[in-house]
Image (cartoon, rainbow, N blue to C red):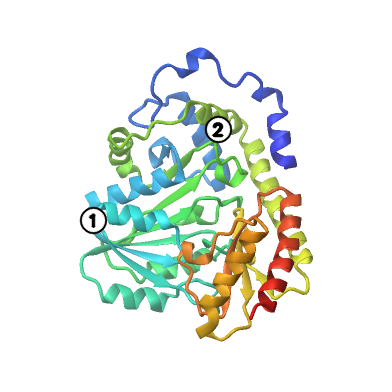
Amino acid sequence: ANYTNSLFSTPNFNSLLEANDFRGYRMDAGAYLGDAKRVLAEAIVAVEGCDFCDSDNFTICPSVSFALFACLIALKQMGIESIFLEAPGYYATVEQGHALGLSIYLLPASPQNGFRVTAEHVSRARNSVSGRCVLVVTQPRYGTGENRAVGEIGHLRSQMRSGDFILVDEAADQTVPAPMAQTPFDGDVQLLRIRGLTKGLGLNSARMATVIHPRELRGAFGDIVDYAGGNLDTASLMLMVRIASNPQFYIAQLQAAQEFVRNQRETFGKNLAGLPIRLSPIESGYFATAHIDTDVPPDAFQAWRQRFLEVCLKYRMPVVLGSSMYFPYDLTTEIVRINYFSEPKNLEKAAYVFSKVLAEVKRSP
């Protein structure tokens, strides 16, 4: 993509690593990161759009998944017993929660609500569970890419009880300023946030994320990073530091990536014209979903899906189904993940294959 080509063509990215750079561990425990963390802090503050934090307000992690795991460890240490996860949601939340012995409660969000849980859903769930809990939500919405109003997330937060937490997963958000930046950490229900530093740029192999948290939790997160093996990849750290050394450049890259994704979605939608497929309204991030009208009754849905997968295999089209993302199903619509950071030619091919697949599935007995 043009935005990543321009990123790596700048002189600052020549000779990124030298032999000495591979000596020693790099982790965000105590003051290990030194000046690197100060540089990252300046970039994070610029993206947030307000001087909300210093280096004790966030902890750098080697990936979004590790950041999530660190949050769940910290929450368990603070007495959290249960997780409410808005579905669709990230599978790692479920698997990591089970590994830590936490109780997992999925809150299915209906298509009629844009796959977003409502305050009423959260209130009913919270009233049915004793002990302290954390509500995990995504921004942008996982699986659709739609940004929610911060007030909507605040309304969900208000349905939790004193001593609970809300964890907002902003893994691939590219929005500047970050929508959640003005939301206070403290209150009866405390706030934790996870942001991918490189994911929104499409640099998935440069793995870096941050947990944004109240200052008083810095020691706890630093300890978790230390004993849980949160060592940072040297190349990823140095790349991100070089990007972050010019905060306005970092912001420009996020905005270029966001514009690229939106253009990809618009073009893909035009290529699908005439097919019974709706695309989710992605506003931020890079993956969303296509929703295929199967035109079969619910009792024939599984047979339709089986035939759909067989034809996809025939045309060698990889498919990630919405069920793997915990999408609730009404058994009339199939849901397929779309990665908008794919090259344009790949999305053009996907539209062509979709037309062939649906034509063959329709002809099936």
Tag 2 secondary structure: helix
Q: Which label is found at residue 233?
A: none
Looking at the picture, does residue 14 appear above or below residue 211? above
Three-letter amino acid code at disc 2? Met
Discs 1/2, front: 1
Q: For the point 40% across and 79% down, which residue is it?
A: 120
User: Is there a contact, CB below 8 Å, between mark 1 and mark 2?
Assistant: no
Looking at the picture, does residue 18 appear above or below residue 86? above
Whether residue 212 is visible to the viewer of this picture, yes or no, is no
Q: Looking at the picture, tell me which residue is in the foreground, 148 or 323.
A: 323
Looking at the picture, does residue 126 appear above or below residue 75? below
Q: Position of residue 83 (x, y in %)?
A: 31, 62
Three-letter amino acid code at disc 1? Gly
Q: For the point 35% across and 72% down, which residue is it?
A: 159
Q: Position of residue 96 (x, y in %)?
A: 33, 52
Whether residue 349 is visible to the viewer of this picture, yes or no, is yes
Q: Quadrant of the C terminus?
A: bottom right
Looking at the picture, does residue 9 appear above or below residue 120? above
Q: Quadrant of the N terminus?
A: top right
Q: Residue furthest top?
A: 20
Q: Which label is found at residue 240?
A: 2
Classify residue 71 as left or right of residue 235.
left
Counting residues from the start of the chain, the first of labels 1 and 2 encountered is 1
Q: Position of residue 39 (x, y in %)?
A: 52, 30
Q: For the point 66% across and 49% down, which residue is it?
A: 341
Q: Position of residue 297 (x, y in %)?
A: 56, 86
Classify residue 13 as left or right of residue 159.
right
Q: CA distance from mark 1 to mark 2?
A: 34 Å
Q: Residues within 10 Å of mark 1 (few under 14, many from 20)?
A: few
Tag 1 secondary structure: loop
Q: Determine which residue is flagged by label 1.
A: 101
What is the count of numbered marks? 2
